Amino acid sequence: EGAVLVDRKGNAFMKRFHPDGDLAPRDVVARAIFTKMLNEDAASMYLDLSGVAKHIDFASRFPNITETCRERGIRVPEDPIPVVPAAHYFCGGIKADTVGVTAVPGLYAIGECACTGLHGANRLASTSLLEGLVWGVETARRIAKSGKALSVERTRSIPQWEMPAGTGADPILVQNDVRQLKTTMWNYIGIIRNQSRLNRAKQDLSQLFASIDSFYRLNLLSAPLLELRNMITVARIIAFAAGRNSHSIGCHYLEGKAE
């Protein structure tokens, strides 16, 4: 719509990072903002809306953004909006084919949790909804057909779970581990990666996983504890997968390597 990314002095900077400027691919824009924040020790960059206000009614066109900004004391479109990179879409996931079939019998994956190859190495804008609809319909048809042939096998009963002694997990410890996990992922497996950071991430995450795994087995289960264990498990998978990928491409941007 004509908005421009600027630094805290009001200077546009995207043309230095890509010929398309503010219309560059989203991974390029994220790296540009991240790099500027790092180099200038800034908490954010800014989105200058002065060009947008000239030809549209901003409040009518973007009511949610307008309300959110005004709740925080930002007068839009007069004031620039502080912006930082953020996780928006999970690229990758459970490997699945074009109808959601995975390597695990009976397990199907569609949408953001699936890795189908549709998006390539970067997310394609406005494709996720269409992907969910198409894959959802095709997967439902596949399940409906295969469901008629399914049979229930007799299995041994699940042993009674023995309740561990002690109380539930200390929420302070869980919250601290979540913060540590987020910091590790942002600093070492974030927008700009290199092998030394990835190695540090694998080391730190393995130690954190061992600690939480023991914590998990010795305490009463709770939603926050289960979520933390799942978060660390996924984080380790991402770290080790990124460490094995020596190609700098799309969201997996390796410092010092040409794409």
Image (cartoon, rainbow, N blue to C red):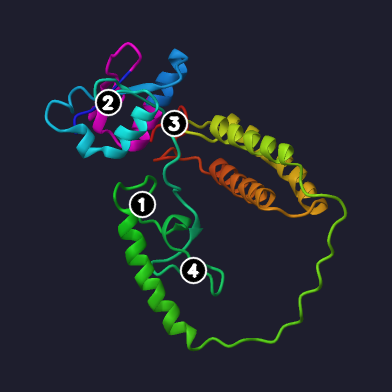
Q: Which residue is mark 2?
A: 76
Label 3 – label 1 distance at C-alpha: 22 Å
Counting residues from the N terminus, which is met first, the one under dot 2 or under dot 4? 2
Horizontal side, residue 218 vs residue 37: left or right? right
Task: Kindly indicate the quadrant of the structure image that contains residue 34.
Answer: top left
- Specify whether residue 16 is painted magenta: yes
Which residue is found at the position 48% from the left and 56% from the top? 113
Counting residues from the N terminus, which is met first, the one under dot 3 or under dot 2? 2
Task: Kindly indicate the quadrant of the structure image that contains residue 77.
Answer: top left
Mark toward the viewer: 2 or 4: 2
Q: Which residue is mark 4?
A: 108
Horizontal side, residue 109 vs residue 210: left or right? left
Counting residues from the N terminus, which is met first, the one under dot 3 or under dot 4? 4
Mark toward the viewer: 3 or 2: 2
Q: Which residue is mark 1?
A: 119
Counting residues from the N terminus, which is met first, the one under dot 1 or under dot 2? 2
At numbered mark 3, what does the secondary structure look like: helix, strand or loop?
loop
